[in-house]
Image (cartoon, helix red, strand yellow):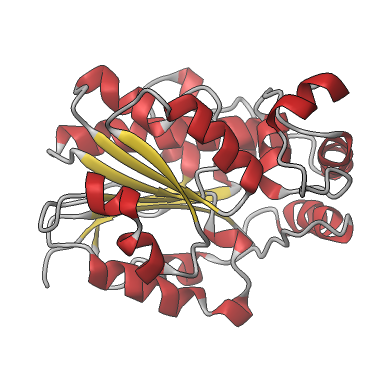
Amino acid sequence: MTTPRQAQDWVPPEIDTTTPSGSRTYDYLLGGAHNFQADRDAAAQAEKIMPGIREVARINRAFLGRVVRALMDLGIRQFLDLGSGIPTVGNVHQVAEEIDPRCRVVYVDRDPIAVAHSEMLLRANENAAIVHADFTDPDGIFASPQARELLRPGEPVGLLMVALLHWIPDESDPQALLARYRRRVPVGSHLAISHLVSDRDNDRINNAVGTFNRARGNDQATTRGYHEVEAMFGDFALLEPGLVGCALWRPGGRGDMSDDPTANTQLYGGVARKTAG
């Protein structure tokens, strides 16, 4: 838990710490220290309705690590991690550097706290950087100094949207936004998505999401069904085993899954390859 004194060291002065945020609540669920009472309260309310929510957060983080390692095996050496959140154990560059220290990673987040922490973490890292931007501005993201320096044009990209798209409301037309990103990356690039479901254990997860949304945070979640999430990959070709419960995407052992079968499927997860221009 972060003390008031510690908060002074890393919180931008303009941040309202009395309003919960998705990234800080997620940090708390993962056991991180960069969150506030409002975030902890929102998480506690959600846990009352959905007791397995911590397991879901852990499973999602494990999915991210498996995706990065799988894409590294396919030759991907540069990543764009959108909605990267507050740095916790198992960041993309940490996983990637274990395989190839020359890997390049560009993180993107709109949360000033997430950006401030990432900047501190990456200060001495020549191969990773953070862009303070919103997912809804792909042109600005690709034109940023960080992306222009680290992402090589024409080289396939690992495009990561892990636990991001359920924070994009329908009125922002996430399908159209995804199409813009898919057009921007070259053939051979891969898109990874995990997303809260609306068609598995409906009542429990929708009630938990409703509880968080009613906490009046700046972030509002939208659950979606299988076919809505599948459509986000467009004409990219899904890798085996397709779009499945997050924990069921190429698990490497018991640590990648939960003893609670419900927790294993409350996020859809999948990775797809761009095969044509």
| 180 with respect to 244 (left or right) | left
| 266 with respect to 84 (left or right) | right
Q: Is residue 61 above or below residue 192?
A: above
- Among the 4 quarters of the image, the one containing residue 23: top right
Q: Nearer the viewer, residue 175 or 202?
A: 175
Quadrant of the rendering where the C terminus is positioned? bottom left
The residue that appears at 57% across and 32% down in the rendered structure is 117
Q: Nearer the viewer, residue 33 or 253?
A: 33
Residue 86 visible? no
In percent of width and height, residue 105 lies at 31, 39
Residue 40 visible? yes
Quadrant of the rendering where the N terminus is positioned? top right
The residue that appears at 49% across and 34% down in the rendered structure is 119
Q: Nearer the viewer, residue 245 or 193?
A: 193
Q: Nearer the viewer, residue 55 or 221?
A: 221
| 257 with respect to 262 (left or right) | left
Q: Is residue 94 above or below residue 75?
A: above
In percent of width and height, residue 263 lies at 63, 38
The residue that appears at 22% across and 22% down in the rendered structure is 101
| 275 with respect to 224 (left or right) | left
In percent of width and height, residue 122 lies at 42, 28
In percent of width and height, residue 76 lies at 17, 41
Q: Is residue 2 above or below residue 170?
A: above
- Among the 4 quarters of the image, the one containing residue 170: bottom right
- Among the 4 quarters of the image, the one containing residue 43: top right
